Amino acid sequence: MGSYRDGTATLVITDATTVPLEIPLEIAASYRARTRGLLGRDGIDGALLLTPAGSVHTLRMRFAIDVAYLDRRLRVLAVRTMPPGRLGRPRLRSRHVLESEAGKMKAWGLGPGTQLDIVS
């Protein structure tokens, strides 16, 4: 937790009932990287962390995405699926936003209260 830099890492999803799940992660921490996000892409392998961020949009995006709003400790506050061309509502306690292709977060078991970790 703390400050992040643009680059790659591994997202670890911790759940007491299963073995931790490791997912490839891209980190967008600079203004430029956050602004670009997933624009211009046809998909993503793994997930993209936007930090800091409290809301997202899917304007000009080519595919639907799952969005998880995270607090400062990387605990999931809410998960939403957003089709292209939408504006997401800001989440007051959100400090980070995790994005993936639609359907992935459900398959990973992400939901409110799920604890995440980032490993370099």
Image (cartoon, grey):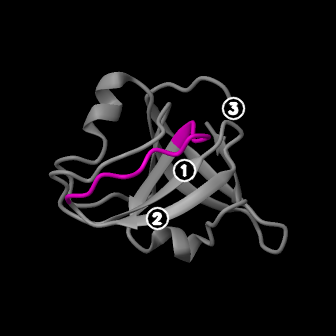
Q: Which residue is mark 2?
A: 80
Name the image quarter holding the C terminus. Answer: top right
State the CA–CA distance, disc 3 to disc 2: 23 Å
Task: State left or right for residue 81 relative to residue 95.
Answer: left
Label 2 Cα neighbours within 10 Å, binned few <14 / some 14-19 / many ≥20: some
Taking depth in this image into account, of 41 and 84 the one nearest to the observer is: 84
Dot 2 lies on which element?
strand
State the CA–CA distance, disc 2 to disc 1: 9 Å
In the rendered image, the vertical position of residue 9 relative to residue 61, given as above or below:
above
Q: Amino acid at mark 2?
A: Arg
Q: Residue at x 67, y 44 (%)?
A: 74
Residue 87 magenta: yes
Instruction: Tell me the magenta residue range.
Output: 85-96
Residue 1 - label = 3
| Image position, residue 116 (x, y; %) | 68, 51
> Mark 1 and mark 2 in contact (Cβ < 8 Å)?
yes
Dot 3 lies on which element?
loop
* Viewer-nearest of discs 1 and 3: 1
In the rendered image, the vertical position of residue 101 relative to residue 27, given as above or below:
below
Label 2 vs 1, first from the N-terminus:
1
Q: Amino acid at mark 1?
A: Tyr
